[in-house]
Amino acid sequence: MSTPTLIGVAEFGGRYTARLIQFGESPEVLVPLLRRIWTDTFRRDTDTMAAALLARDWWPLAINPRHRRWDPQPPVPGLGYPAVTEDDTIRQGSLRENLGGFLEWLYLLHLDQRLVVVYEATVHGRWLRHSAHHLDPVEDLFVTAPALDEGGPEMTVCTVCGAVDEIDHVEVPSMAGYGHDTATSCTRCGSSVATDPVSGGHVTRKPWPPHTPTTGSTR
C-alpha cells in the first residue's frame, strides 16, 4: 500500500523544500535507512545527500536498489528508485499548510545539525512533530538539540526512539544518606538513566520499536 511521504530540507520560519516518496515508511523503518544512506552512500556529507534527494521524486528509497524491468528509469545506486510523476517539481511548503488528506509523513533534514525531524499528518490535515533523530547517533541516551525555530527553546531528544521533549525526571534524597537519587526516563519508549551517589549512573535502553509478543498455538 502506498504511503505518500515528503523528504526534504528545513528552512527558516517553518518553511521547507521537499520531494515526494510515493512508497514512504514510518520513522522506525525510514530513519535507519536514511542513516545508512548518509554513511554508506554519501560518506556523512549531509549537503550532498540533501541535493541528491531533492533532484527528483522517488518510489521507495533503498540502499541497494536493483534494476527492475518494469521501472521506466534505472535505479540510483545507494539511494533508491526514481519516480516518474506528472508534476515532477520540487515542493515548497510550510509546516502550517493545509495538507488536504494526501500525505502521511514529512522528513526534514536540518543540515547544520545533521538532524532529521519527522512530522506526521493529523486527522485535522496539519503537520504534527513526531520525533527527531540524529543522523549520527551518540552514546548519550538523552541529548539537547538546538531549537527548530529561531529564538525557540532547545529540545531534549531521546536517541533510542527519537521522542522530543517527552522526558520525565524525578529527583529524591538518596537512601545512601547524602546526595540525591535521580531517574530520567523517556515516556515514549521507557529508556532511562538512573543515578545515585554510590554506584553512579546506569543506562537502560529499551527495544525500539517495541517487540511484538508472539503467541503459540495450543493443542
Image: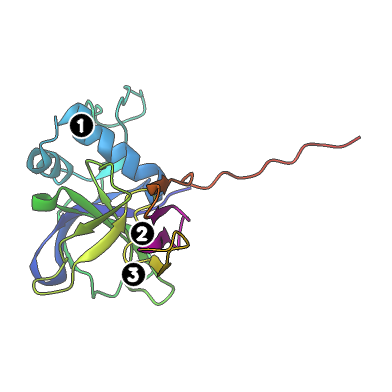
Residue corresponding to mark 1? 39
Q: Which mark is residue 29?
A: none
Q: Residue at x 87, y 37 (%)?
A: 218
| Residue 5 left/right relative to 214 | left
For numbered disc 2, what is the local secondary structure?
loop
Q: Nearer the viewer, residue 41 or 7?
A: 41
**For marks 2 and 3 on the same chain, the one whose residue lies earlier in the sequence:** 3
CB atoms at circles 1 and 3 under 8 Å apart?
A: no
What residue did someone put label 3 on? 128
Q: Which residue is mark 2?
A: 163
Q: Residues within 10 Å of mark 3 (few under 14, many from 20)?
A: some
Q: Position of residue 40 (x, y in %)?
A: 21, 27
Percent x, y of residue 207: 48, 44
User: Is there CB contact under 8 Å for labels 2 and 1?
Assistant: no
Q: Which residues are magenta?
A: 179-196
Is 196 located above or below residue 216 in the figure?
A: below
**Quadrant including the C terminus:** top right
Residue depicted at x 33% and y 69%: 128
Q: Looking at the picture, how far across and down is residue 132, in whole percent?
A: 28, 56
Residue 122 to residue 44: above or below: below
| The one of 134 and 34 positioned closer to us in this rendering | 134
Residue drawn at point x = 46 percent, y = 46 percent: 208
Assess disc 2: are there few (<14), some (14-19) or many (≥20) residues with their C-alpha within 10 Å of its C-alpha. many
Looking at the rendered structure, the kind of residue marked 3 is Leu
Q: Amino acid at mark 2?
A: Ala
Mark before the other along the chain sequence, 2 or 1: 1
Report, in whole angstroms, how far the alpha carbon at label 2 lies from the one at label 3. Answer: 13 Å
Residue 101 picture quarter? bottom left
